[in-house]
Amino acid sequence: MKSANRHSSAQEAADAAATTAFAARNFSDNAALHAVAEGGGALCTIVGIEGSFSRQLGAQLAIRRDSTVVGSLADGCLEAQLVAEVARIDGPVVRLYGRGSEQIDFRLPCGSAIHILIDPAPDREAIARVARDLSERRPATLALPLPDKCDRGLLRHRHFFPDLTIIALGNGPESEALAHLADAAGVNIRSYGPDSAELALGRAPDLPAPDAWTAVILLFHDHEWERELLRWALGSDAFYIGAQGGAVARQRRLEVLADDGVSHADRARITSPVGIFPQARQPAALALSALSDIIFRYAALEPDQ
């Protein structure tokens, strides 16, 4: 039987959630999972969507033991509802919010409905295994403990893939702007310039090979640096390989790689000019354009839930 103290703390927890719903966020949707793996707490997962909604199926939110929230499922109001709900339940439940919901004091402005699995005490061992796989850059799957009588059409397994990583090679204001924007967006970026110990002209970088969830972007004005760096990137599983440069530099780059025996298919993997609006000239605009393109392509890798 739940204690009276647990009931009395519900409103206090809800109030706390309203002010912390946007705290401790990360660009990656894996942030909620990592929060539970590291410190325990509840895990909330969208397991069904009726109509359209601003978040995807499988989106998650963690509620730490101090009622702070990691992640986001709506605009802050739903987060407060979930914190209050966690304080009232003893095991996993699925709640309907929005159209057709018994929660008459809460409606989604889009007129849709979402089913949320609220698990107040998720399997931390299973979550830790998933978190470990992700930290080792491997995709992973977490079984969701839906109650037996739930609709069979609801999501029962949440698939995860590693966080986006960007390896930025180059120097100058474009590199600085990209690093600044990526940091602000919560994207893991590792930057290396000509003065870095990992880079030397005429040889491959002293870095691990990029994996399938890593983007490599070259931001050099001195294109002599590119030859071996591009050959290294093209020999990897990187999902994105970009290099800045004007029309003359782009043509010369492809000719050099062709002379080196790099196949047409591999040369076609190089995105140049970089970004979603290729006419960007200002460093900040170019960096924003390139980051937007990288994030868009990374999101397209996400597995179907």
Image: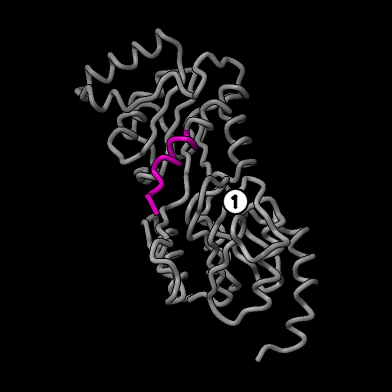
Of residues 7 and 285, the one nearer the viewer is 7
Left or right: 100 with respect to 222?
Answer: right
Q: Position of residue 304 (x, y in %)?
A: 38, 50
In the rendered image, which quarter is residue 84 located in?
bottom right
Task: Give the answer, above or below, for where 106 lies relative to 86.
Answer: above
Of residues 145 and 40, the one nearer the viewer is 145
Q: Position of residue 23 (x, y in %)?
A: 70, 55
Task: Give the answer, above or below, for where 212 lies relative to 245.
Answer: below
Left or right: 266 with respect to 84?
Answer: left
Q: Which residues are magenta?
A: 294-305
Q: Position of residue 130 (x, y in %)?
A: 42, 65
* Residue sitting at x 75%, y 81%: 7
Task: Give the answer, above or below, for where 125 lies relative to 83.
Answer: below
Check residue 139 for magenta coloring: no
* Residue sitting at x 37%, y 56%: 139
Q: Position of residue 190 (x, y in %)?
A: 51, 41
Left or right: 38 with respect to 257?
Answer: right
* Residue sitting at x 42%, y 56%: 160
Residue on which the image places disc 1: 26
Task: Give the answer, above or below, for where 181 lies relative to 152.
Answer: above
